[in-house]
Amino acid sequence: MVVPSVTSSLKKYKGKWGRPEVTHLLKRTMFGAKKEDIDYFASRSLRHTIRQLLNTEEPIPAPPVNNYNDDKYTDEEIQPGVTWITAAKYSGMNGGRRRNSLKAWWTGCMLNQQRTLREKMVLFWHNHFATETNSVDNPTMIYKHNVVLRQYALGNFKTMVRAITVDAAMLKYLNGNANTKKAPDENYGRELQELFTVGKGPGSHYTEADVKAAARVLTGFRIENKSLPDVHGLFDAGRHDETDKQFSAFYNNQVIKGRKGKEGEMELDDLLDLIFQQPEAARFICRKLYRFFVYHQIDDATEKTIIEPLAHTFRQNNYEIKPVLEKLFISRHFFDMGNRGGIIKSPVDFAVGLCREYSIPFPAEDSYVDQYGFWLNIQQTASQMQQNIGDPPNVAGWPAYYQEPMYDKSWISSDTLPKRTAFTDRMVNNGFVRNGKKILIDPVVFAKQLSAPGDPNNLIDELAALLYAVELPAEEKQYMKTGILLQGLQGMASDHYWTDAWQKLQDKPDDSANTKNVTNKLKNLLKYMMSLPQYQLM
């Protein structure tokens, strides 16, 4: 087998812009590549496509609602179907229910995403600025944190770091609210450098003294929670260390002058200026973006010809995120054959992407209890495969995004792979059922959107192009035809058998025997296709 080579170049891609290229771009930048989205962007230019994907004018989705009243609990403050983010009361009874409501809502945002990169970036930043709902506990704070990720998803990274630093959920999660001049807490000061900005790469040489100095700079922030809907981070001058803070040679031996009173909050900006003067901050974020969108391995050539130029673009644009992503997504390197199908789908990509690619209909807003219930089914499916949004395993996020040498291979194990196949089988067979409603794949409806579903060769070719990010061997397609679509025929199996059966389904849909036969063969075909290793890749 010949492994496609990879061009280490950020020069603009000027090759073919067809369905395979659109599919590759969409599988990486959205959750799954829907046929209607592929059709839409294939009729436009690459530049137009990138511009639309990077659109930042998309409004924040309507907030999560009370879908959680049951026989054990009724929320007397928040009416059914009304958002709970305005609630003044928070308790053990409603807290867990609201956190589940938020996870369902967030999954719904992914399932219903517009043709933009925002939802993928919200997940990227959630993994980068990891918090855990079980630790933060307060659902209103968790929701507001999610909104911060959305607001800055494609904005200015430096501004985002500041907003995250004073965000109530992050103050709670990394003890920023307990960081005072009498008892400095180093937790956030450490993670700000190690995980959020300059990282632990070869060019990062901050010291323990820098961690301690940063902690002292950050003293004084606390959570204002007298009024639950208005819970937020604020600066309390009485808790702030007003002395000077000395930093190491890595930060050019700079000193952040201590400030008194309310001006003490300005030391945070001094600290961020100091951190973002370091070229390593841009390199670190560009490496994370590269691993998320392109490939886990960054060798010396990639570091020199891809990461360094991206980091230069990042710094030149004052840490604006969009110019970096535009340069990456429009490059020859991104579209190289060697970079296609090179990432194992995360559980969220796998579960949400399946629902989107098959255009599975969910209940409408007027059936919000069932709607949220099905959204939660998809969220919990991904969670069982080891990606529980809202609750990554620790402050570093999910190991698949950073832990060498495994990286994304760690998504697949003897535990998680059977769960993936069980999910795809379930979505073809019976789906999920609630109150007489179902979410599942309708194989006949899905096949009807293809150009010639009555031609078994064309049917398999088009399905493979939609479901896979890599080419399928000819012998595999032949097996799908003879071993599944034409299986069970008397004598010589030939293509016209399937063509006749499909045509009969259109002409005589009330012929139950033929309808059942065609439907079952399509079900078997889809289950087989999704059980292959190629379906795990994007």
Image: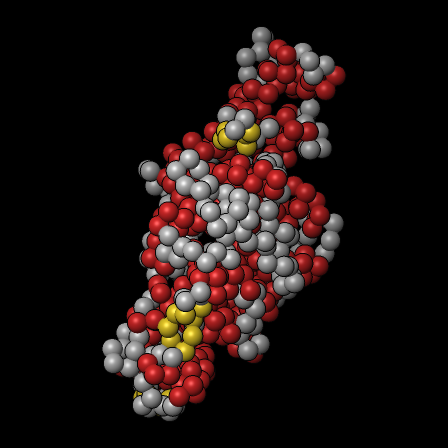
Residue 421 appears left or right of 21 = left
Q: Residue furthest top?
A: 490
Q: Residue furthest left?
A: 183
Question: Residue 439: image x %, image y %?
Answer: 55, 32
Name the one closer to the observer, 230 or 62. Answer: 230
Question: Residue 468: image x %, image y %?
Answer: 55, 40
Vertical comparison of 493 with 377: above or below: above
Among the 4 quarters of the image, the one containing residue 381: top left
Q: Residue at position x 65%, y 29% from top? A: 445
- What sort of colour scheme is used for the picture? secondary structure
Vertical comparison of 466 with 458: above or below: below
Vertical comparison of 279 with 519: above or below: below
Name the one closer to the observer, 323 or 109. Answer: 109
Q: Residue furthest front?
A: 76
Name the one closer to the observer, 424 or 414. Answer: 424
User: Can residue 494 be seen at all in this image of the molecule?
Assistant: no
Q: Residue at position x 54%, y 21% from top? A: 484
Question: Residue 73: image x %, image y %?
Answer: 41, 41
Q: Residue at position x 52%, y 77% from top? A: 315
